[in-house]
Amino acid sequence: MATLSSYITEVRRLLHDANGNFYSDSQLTDYINSARERAVRDTGCLREIVVTQTPCQVAPSATINNTTPANPTAWVANTAVTLNSFVFSNIFIYQYTTAGISGSTAPAYPSNGTNNYTNYPPTTSFADGTAQLTYVGNCENVSYAALTQLMGSSPLSPSSGNTVLDIININLYWGNTRVPLDYLAWSDFNARLRFWQNYIGRPLAFSIYGQGQIYLGPVPDQTYQIEIDCVVLPNPLSLNTPTVTDVINDPYSTMVKFYAAYLAKYYEQSYGEAEIYKQEYNKQGASVLNSVFTRRIPSVYSSPM
């Protein structure tokens, strides 16, 4: 099992700097952490399943009053509501910025409090009975930032705080079944499932928008449990705890030292040597992927299940 100490030793051997005459441990630690992230990006080796719900909690940056985001609950009429709690209605997620009793009818869509159908999304707070609602997000969105915040709270997610890099699959719980959602490219998804603004129902597909947003379509009409298969970036290793075992296991960890050595040689402008280490990193990556994936047999019988 790799640790920061073992990584530093391996990189020093490649650099012929066993006594630390040219590179400090701090400098090599930066290169090693960059190499670990690069290895995950190139292989997708570090994956976690996050179990959450949709509509999901909004990203931390979307909340008001420095409130820790929470999964929203469905809006209910004539009910006592607390300050800063989150609810969803139709296609929007709201935060109560004033406590009170919710109104007798659901918030209009879209709404500025006066049944005005020109605001999308609502831009100002509006009354909900004796309480006050403020728009904070859309029910169709799941942000990578929210998933990162949830990391570690799921029993299937052993790590904490790993940054979500990419989404591979999404399963939706429907009764006793797990329904895999189809993936659509954004242009296709936008044309098929976002034509009607208030098209709500059980989600059938997902798409990725930009660098940090998952979109579900149709917009969920109620709370659904979902599990999201994520590729995550590893937390940095620290010199304060150099013997902690890395979450990147063998054989993927064997790639790290070569990319770290490449960064070190590139720093000192030894571009020829740097290129050799980078080529070796690429060779090691190809070898790792071949050794891990090619020995799996889809079915031992003549036809798959």
Image (cartoon, rainbow, N blue to C red):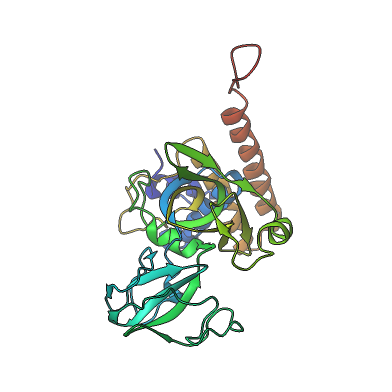
Q: Is residue 283 above or below residue 124?
A: above
Does residue 182 appear anywhere in the picture?
yes
Which quadrant of the structure image shows residue 200? bottom right
Residue 205, position as x, y percentages in the image: 61, 50
| Residue at x 28%, y 72% (from the top left corner) | 79
Question: In which image quadrant can residue 301 be found?
Answer: top right
Residue at image point 44% right, 45% down: 49
Residue 182 in the image: state x and y as whole percent: 62, 45
Residue at the top extreme, as displayed = 301
**The N terminus is located in which quarter?**
top left
Q: Is residue 185 left or right of residue 161?
A: right
- The image position of residue 113, as x and y in percent, is 47, 86
Closer to the camera in the image, 78 or 254: 78
Q: Nearer the viewer, residue 186 or 205?
A: 205
Viewer-nearest residue: 268 or 35: 35
Residue 173 position within the rendered picture, expressed as x and y whole percent measured from the top left:
45, 44
Q: Choose top left, top right, bottom left or bottom right for residue 125.
A: bottom left
User: What residue lies at 33% left-to-right and 76% top-to-bottom?
Assistant: 67
- Say which quadrant the C terminus sits in: top right
**Position above or below: 146 against 19:** below
Residue 20 visible to an observer of this rendering:
no
Which residue is at the front of the view, 226 or 166?
226
Question: Residue pushed farthest front?
Answer: 104
Q: Could you tell whether 260 is left or right of 156 in the image?
A: right
Position of residue 269 relative to residue 287, above or below, is: below
In this rendering, position of residue 6 left or right of residue 186: left
